[in-house]
Amino acid sequence: MEITWSHFTEKIELLPEVAIGTLIVYIAIIAYTRIFGLKSLSKMTGFDFLNTVAIGNLLAMSAATSSPSLFVGAILIGLLYLINYLVSVIMVKSQSAQQLLDNSPILLMKDGNLLEDNIKKSKITMDELRGKLREANVIQLSEVKAVVFETTGDISVLHTDQPKELDSFIMKDVKE
């Protein structure tokens, strides 16, 4: 295949349309984010990640290929935001929907002890775990009450040097 300069300049007359359309779709994404809330930009669950990838793909396709058209792309992106918002509302209102659509947090350490089966299931390396413990300023493993692998992929370290028990509310949805 021979590549010529015309390959790069083909359809250059569409550049103003694509630039204006991209700006419109970009503004639409900002508006949708304002309408549907900051959760669309927060730490992501698997469902949020899927939505973000789909939105990015639609933006790129609409801007670069005009297929779907920029207007249709903007509408589809709005529908994805709406679906994400509706799923969030359903998950808040229904515990069974939340369990179906979202992962559960997993306990990696309890009372200073490593839960190696859970660490392996979570695919967390010991180096990552040690790093999170250091970030949380843990000096002794005996200070650690719990380490939880959250649904967003974050690792929470709950520690104290005081003889306190964890409140059951905090650990309610965590799988041991």
Image: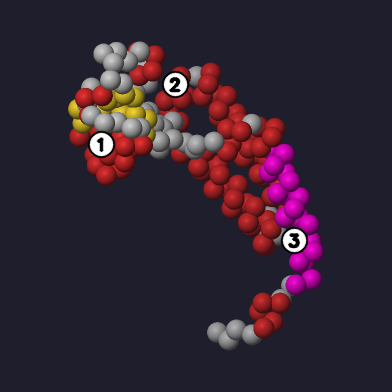
Circle 3 or circle 2, nearest the eye: 3
Mark 1 and mark 3 residues within 8 Å of each other at the beta carbon: no
Residue where numbered disc 1 is placed:
119
Q: Position of residue 67 (x, y in %)?
A: 68, 58
Q: Secondary structure at mark 1?
A: helix
- Span highlighted in magenta in the image: 12-32
Residue where numbered disc 2 is placed:
96
Three-letter amino acid code at the position of disc 3:
Val
Q: Nearer the viewer, residue 168 or 127?
A: 127
What label does residue 18 carry, if any? 3
- At label 3, counting other C-alpha atoms closer than 10 Å, the crowd grade (few under 14, some 14-19, many 20 or more) is some
Q: Earlier in the sequence, mark 1 or mark 2?
A: 2
Q: Quadrant of the C terminus?
A: top left
Whether residue 13 is in magenta: the answer is yes
For residue 158, side relative to residue 62 (left or right): left
Q: Secondary structure at mark 2?
A: helix
The residue shown at (27%, 25%) is 144
